[in-house]
Image (spheres, helix red, strand yellow):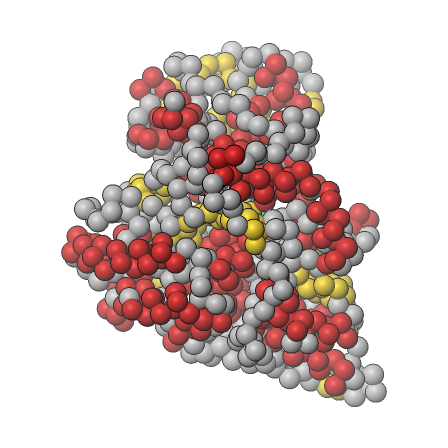
């Protein structure tokens, strides 16, 4: 039986009446996205038709998921909320902190030992507050959620940007910062600007070498890393229904890479089959009863242009396999064009390593199809040229693929099987030789390929592809190999062609695992002691941030004017810093160390206006803090893109930065800043970015009458005493202004329990 079946039942019972009310209010047929959103309003039955891209709406998500690297901060905040138990079903997944070095068994044991105090904290805090705990080795959050918790028509939030993966099972699943998760677990509403809608019509059917991954690689090429901002992407058409449920998951997963709020698909037979084979026939039977509510109204898919803000059409019959990269997931190249482009751009074409798996692509089908290629190595007398690794997404998948002989097949091509965890996808790959910084190429089936992401080497050119293509390219050892047309020379000197991949969508013998790795919380957690050592350098209980002083902010110093791309990796780097995710003061020593200083083009080197000396960003900021001087961070467009990590907002808050002023923000990061009581501002006129000088003192004027949709003013006092001022925008609503005044949203929750 599925987890939380009563909750799912209640969602389905409410849906029909709420959807009918929304249809009457909007006076039009509804998309699936609207059906799910309108049936999860905090107010219950809808009473207003919301303006897409405009109205802030309070929602009541059904569940919360957290991974270990973000759960620490989310739960440290929750502990301050004064609640005895979480208000909605919630889970914690230990996946990000496991390094991939030798192979699964050794690496897992090392991680369990190294991260013991963090795991003990997460396990005890979960036990206390009624949270399901998935132990290290159980698998990656998004795969475990898809296997156990996702359900068609549901709404969830998760403290990881790839929470969106659950759209593969017809959910609206959204990545958030820990403070948002904390609110929902504390029984409060969750706010989101009502999204715009992009419809993607998939005609034809996947065939041959083309995989679901190629759909999203193509979409990323069309929309770019910013194109989905503020939008939900809804897929439909014959190509959607004929695709596996896990394939849909892959497509939704990488919706994070186009900045989309989330992506989803209507309920269909593939989802029913997946629910049945993962032990949730009960959910499938209930979903069948409300089937019409779990997909858009027929008029919508018949005339999508009328109901979506943008429509994209992709013909799967002719879609080619793609390789996206290097260094950004939206640089999409069809395989037939790779030879030409690699030559033109000087990309190294020798493939050193092929890596399959991760939360994006480790379904049974993915592995089966990749294994069908690995098998041909022996049968066709070939030799695999590149190294090959597999990171299974969960123990359920790992156990089943081992039982069905796929791991043995991969072993014949010399594969390494890493732990069921994020590993190489998040810089937790102790790749031998990476420190030499040599120029080299890898291909992987993960989702992100920003510089340094996998192995820390800035000269690793990483290309994202389907597991099938990764396997074929690893066998060939060549980025320009097109398996659709090219041949390989085998050991006997013959020219052979790889047959197109094949594989079952789901295991014929069913899924199995000896121990899936789940730990249920205590029935009554009131007596459970949460384990945090006061001397720990990895965990630190939080102190409340100070409330706003009630005046305009004056005499702020410019900490840094960041130039160009400034992702959450630039603001709060992962890799080696993951270990401080539960210790705000320690992790603050990575604040903005990756951002490029506009004035000298260097990273982690800014001017301390008090001494005139240049030094690292965190140390400079600590000096201002010690002197009681507030600062401001200035940035470019899409500031804070990438991950959901709220450390990127909490670190500046903790160290005394008062405002972040940029050309534009990525959604999750902007909310994270607001939640922590920071000022997140945008230039009304982007060219004003150029007015900011290195030795400026800055005043923020208008806070006494801070109100929604009312601009604030920035006054610059330049070193020569001259002054300039300009207007800045913000997107704070009334509630969010209260967060600012209280010094952070959590201070309001805390006050409500006293
Ligand atoms: C990622 O893929 O970048 C991560 C690591 O999963 C992050 C979360 C984090 O920083 O902990 C994400 O995508 O939100
Ligand atoms: Fe883990 Fe990578 Fe997935 Fe993020 S994208 S959850 S790091 S496997």
> In the rendering, at what x and y percent does residue 180 appear?
43, 39
Can residue 87 be seen here?
A: yes
Q: Give coordinates of residue 494: x percent, y percent.
A: 79, 88
In this rendering, the count of numbered labels is: 0
Which of the 4 image quadrants contains residue 122?
top right
Say if residue 446 shows up in the picture.
no
User: Taking 570 as reference, is 389 above or below it?
Assistant: below
> In this orientation, which residue lies closer to the viewer: 136 or 70?
136
Q: Is residue 105 above or below residue 435?
A: below
- Which residue is located at x 29 percent, y 43 percent? 42
The C terminus lies in which quarter of the figure? top left
In this image, 660 relative to 602: left or right? left
**Which residue lies at the image location 60% right of the left edge and 12% below the top edge?**
627
Q: In which quarter of the image is residue 473?
A: bottom right
Location of residue 390 in the rendering, given as x and y in whole percent from the top left corner? 68, 64
Q: Please identify the quadrant where the N terminus is shown.
A: bottom left
Q: Quadrant of residue 549?
A: top left
Task: Please determine whether, in this image, residue 718 is positioned above or below residue 683.
Answer: above
39 horizontally vs 27: left or right: right
Instruction: Identify which residue, 222 or 197, lies in the foreground.
Output: 197
Q: Report x, y in % for residue 115.
A: 69, 42
The residue depicted at 40 percent of the width and 45 percent of the height is 88
């Amino acid at each position: 039986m599925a987890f939380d079946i009563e909750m799912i039942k209640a969602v389905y019972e409410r849906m029909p009446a709420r959807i009918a009310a929304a249809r009457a209010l909007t006076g039009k047929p509804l998309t699936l996205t609207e059906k799910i959103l309108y049936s999860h309003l905090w107010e219950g039955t809808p009473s207003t038709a919301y303006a897409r891209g405009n109205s802030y709406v309070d929602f009541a998500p059904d569940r919360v998921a957290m991974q270990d690297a973000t759960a620490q901060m989310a739960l440290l905040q929750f502990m301050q909320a004064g609640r005895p138990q979480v208000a909605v079903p919630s889970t914690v997944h230990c996946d990000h902190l496991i390094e991939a070095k030798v192979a699964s068994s050794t690496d897992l044991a090392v991680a369990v030992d190294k991260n013991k105090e963090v795991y003990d904290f997460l396990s005890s805090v979960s036990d206390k507050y009624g949270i399901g705990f998935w132990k290290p080795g159980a698998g990656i959050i998004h795969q475990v959620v898809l296997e156990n918790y996702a359900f068609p028509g549901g709404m969830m939030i998760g403290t990881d940007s790839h929470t969106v993966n659950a759209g593969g099972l017809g959910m609206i699943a959204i990545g958030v910062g820990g403070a948002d998760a904390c609110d929902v677990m504390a029984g409060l509403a969750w706010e989101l600007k009502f999204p715009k809608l992009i419809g993607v019509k998939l005609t034809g059917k996947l065939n041959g070498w083309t995989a679901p991954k190629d759909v999203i690689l193509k979409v990323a090429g069309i929309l770019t890393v910013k194109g989905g901002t503020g939008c939900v992407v809804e897929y439909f058409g014959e190509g959607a229904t004929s695709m596996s449920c896990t394939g849909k998951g892959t497509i939704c997963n990488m919706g994070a890479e186009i900045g989309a709020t989330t992506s989803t698909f209507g309920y269909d037979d593939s989802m029913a089959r997946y629910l049945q084979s993962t032990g949730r026939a009960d959910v499938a039977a209930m979903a069948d009863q409300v089937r019409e509510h779990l997909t858009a109204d027929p008029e919508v898919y018949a005339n999508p242009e009328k109901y979506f803000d943008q429509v994209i059409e992709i013909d799967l019959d002719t879609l080619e396999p793609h390789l996206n990269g290097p260094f950004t997931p939206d640089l999409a190249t069809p395989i037939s064009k790779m030879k030409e482009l690699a030559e033109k751009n000087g990309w190294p074409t020798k493939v050193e390593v092929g890596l399959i798996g991760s939360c994006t692509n480790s379904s049974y089908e993915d592995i089966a199809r990749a294994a069908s290629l690995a098998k041909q190595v022996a049968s066709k007398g070939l030799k695999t040229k590149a190294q090959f690794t597999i990171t299974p997404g969960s123990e359920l998948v790992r156990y089943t693929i081992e039982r069905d002989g796929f791991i043995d097949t991969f072993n014949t091509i010399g594969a390494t099987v890493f732990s069921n965890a994020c590993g190489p996808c998040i810089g937790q790959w102790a790749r031998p030789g990476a420190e030499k910084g040599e120029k080299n190429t890898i291909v992987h089936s993960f989702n992100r390929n920003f510089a340094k992401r996998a192995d820390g080497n800035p000269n690793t050119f990483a290309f994202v592809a389907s597991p099938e293509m990764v396997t074929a390219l690893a066998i060939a050892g060549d980025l320009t190999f097109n398996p659709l047309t090219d041949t390989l020379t085998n050991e006997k000197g013959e020219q052979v062609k790889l047959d197109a991949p094949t594989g079952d969508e789901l295991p014929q013998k069913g899924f199995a695992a000896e121990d899936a790795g789940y730990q249920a919380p205590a029935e009554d957690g009131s007596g459970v002691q949460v384990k945090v050592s006061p001397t720990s350098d990895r965990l630190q209980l939080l102190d409340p941030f100070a409330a706003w002083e009630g005046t305009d902010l004056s005499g702020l110093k410019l900490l840094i004017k960041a130039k160009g791309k400034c992702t959450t990796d630039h603001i709060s780097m992962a890799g080696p810093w993951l270990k401080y995710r539960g210790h705000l003061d320690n992790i603050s020593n990575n604040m903005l160390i990756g951002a490029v200083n506009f004035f000298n083009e260097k990273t982690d080197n800014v001017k301390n206006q008090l001494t005139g000396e240049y030094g690292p960003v965190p140390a400079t900021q600590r000096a201002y803090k010690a002197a009681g001087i507030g600062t401001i961070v200035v940035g470019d467009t899409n500031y804070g893109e990438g991950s959901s990590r709220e450390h990127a907002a909490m670190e500046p808050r903790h160290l005394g930065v008062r405002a972040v002023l940029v050309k534009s923000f990525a959604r999750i990061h902007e909310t994270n800043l607001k939640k922590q009581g920071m000022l997140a501002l945008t230039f009304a006129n982007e060219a004003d970015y150029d007015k900011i000088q290195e030795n400026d003192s800055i005043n923020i004027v208008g806070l006494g009458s801070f109100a929604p949709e009312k601009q604030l003013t920035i006054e610059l006092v330049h070193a020569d005493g001259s002054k300039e001022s300009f207007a800045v925008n913000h997107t704070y609503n009334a509630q969010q202004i209260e967060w600012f005044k209280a010094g952070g949203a959590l201070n309001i929750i805390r006050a409500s329990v006293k």
